[in-house]
Amino acid sequence: MAHKPFKAVIPAAGLGTRFLPATKAMPKEMLPVVDKPAIQYVVEEAVSAGIEDVLIIIGRNKNNIANHFDSMPELEVKLREKGDLDRLAKVEHSTDLADIHMVRQGEPKGLGHAVLRARSHVGDHPFAVLLGDDLIDERDPLLTTMLGEYDRHGASVVALMEVDPDQVHLYGVAAVEATDTDGVVKITGLVEKPKKEDAPSNYAVIGRYVLGPEIFDVLEHTEPGKGGEIQLTDALQEQAADPDAGVYGVVFGGRRYDTGDKLDYIKAIVQLASDREDLGAELRPWLKDFAAGL
Ligand code: G1P
């Protein structure tokens, strides 16, 4: 690795309007998925890939996120007095996870704009961007594979998944070419949220990116695109079209849980809970009975 260590950037400044009223006074990243806030899964994913420095781009109602990754002395003392060491470990775990930093986005002007807000903290390190709406199962080390591909190509890497053509309008979509590595493609073009008939393929960008610091210069001059927002997809399209830059895709076939809307969020909780040792054994037969009665 001939570069500085990877950092992680987690944009968490969205308004979360799809989850109102739950997100009236709380960021959607703090919604629990079983018993952990969604954003903790994402920080844990970065840490398991070996990243220690995590920058969270926050919006309004930031205090909940900051408090979650901070120590909570009153609660810790109470749990220690009660001898409840299991829960104490859970409370302390999120504090000790990583070196967490925060920066405010101010006006939300799109994902590209959020990433640009990371510039002064990230400096000349390469970095991973992890979007909290996509949770990747901890048994499927997607990010580790992507960091490896960044090292191999020295170019931006995005995670791709094949989706139903009726879903392409929800994603950045890539035109791809095979490489000599199975599961890794070269991206020849990218379009943000195309109509089904305009999509170059059904390879959708899911919320994981590994980028070099050069992306900041591109984002500085990226004009507002789809929805009037500065799109990370458009900056990556510029790199894909530049023979000196290039963008690669890691095609993910593992377990991904979308928590971006209500129905998917409920499905994610059910899937993750049925896999858990402490809940699955009771939940699975109950689910079967429940479904049989519908
Ligand atoms: C963002 C990106 C999009 C990407 C998606 C992945 O869209 O703009 O290119 O495919 O995340 O989840 P959003 O879902 O924030 O609208």
Image (spheres, rainbow, N blue to C red):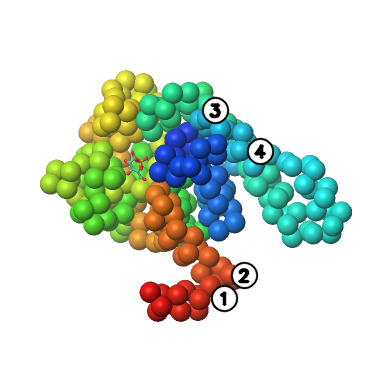
Mark 1 vs mark 4, CA separation in Å:
33 Å
First reached walking from the N terminus: tag 1 or tag 4: 4
For disc 3, the marked residue is 103
In 3D space, how far apart are the residues under numbered discs 2 and 4 (Cα atoms)? 27 Å
Q: Of tags 1 and 2, which is closer to the observer?
A: 1
The earlier-in-sequence mark between 2 and 3 is 3
Under circle 4, the secondary element is helix
Query: What whole-number distance in Å separates the C-alpha atoms at marks 4 and 3?
Result: 15 Å
Residue highlighted by disc 2: 278
Closest to the camera, between mark 4 and mark 3, is 4
The reply to whether the C-beta atoms of the residues labelled 2 and 4 are less than 8 Å apart is no
Q: Residue at x 84, y 59 (%)?
A: 83
Question: Does residue 253 lie above or below 26 as drawn?
Answer: below
Image check: 1 left or right of 78? left
Q: Position of residue 198 (x, y in %)?
A: 14, 43
Q: Which of 213 and 105 lies nearest the eye of the viewer? A: 105
Quarter holding the C terminus is bottom left
Give the residue furthest to the top: 221
Q: Please tell me whether mark 2 or mark 3 is closer to you in this view.
A: 2
Q: Which residue is mark 1?
A: 282
Mark number for residue 182?
none
Instruction: Name the outermost residue toward the right.
Output: 81
Which secondary structure, mark 1?
helix
Chain-order first, disc 4 or disc 3: 4
Residue 67 marker: 4
Query: Percent position (x, y) of residue 232?
Result: 34, 33
Q: Position of residue 181 (x, y in %)?
A: 31, 56
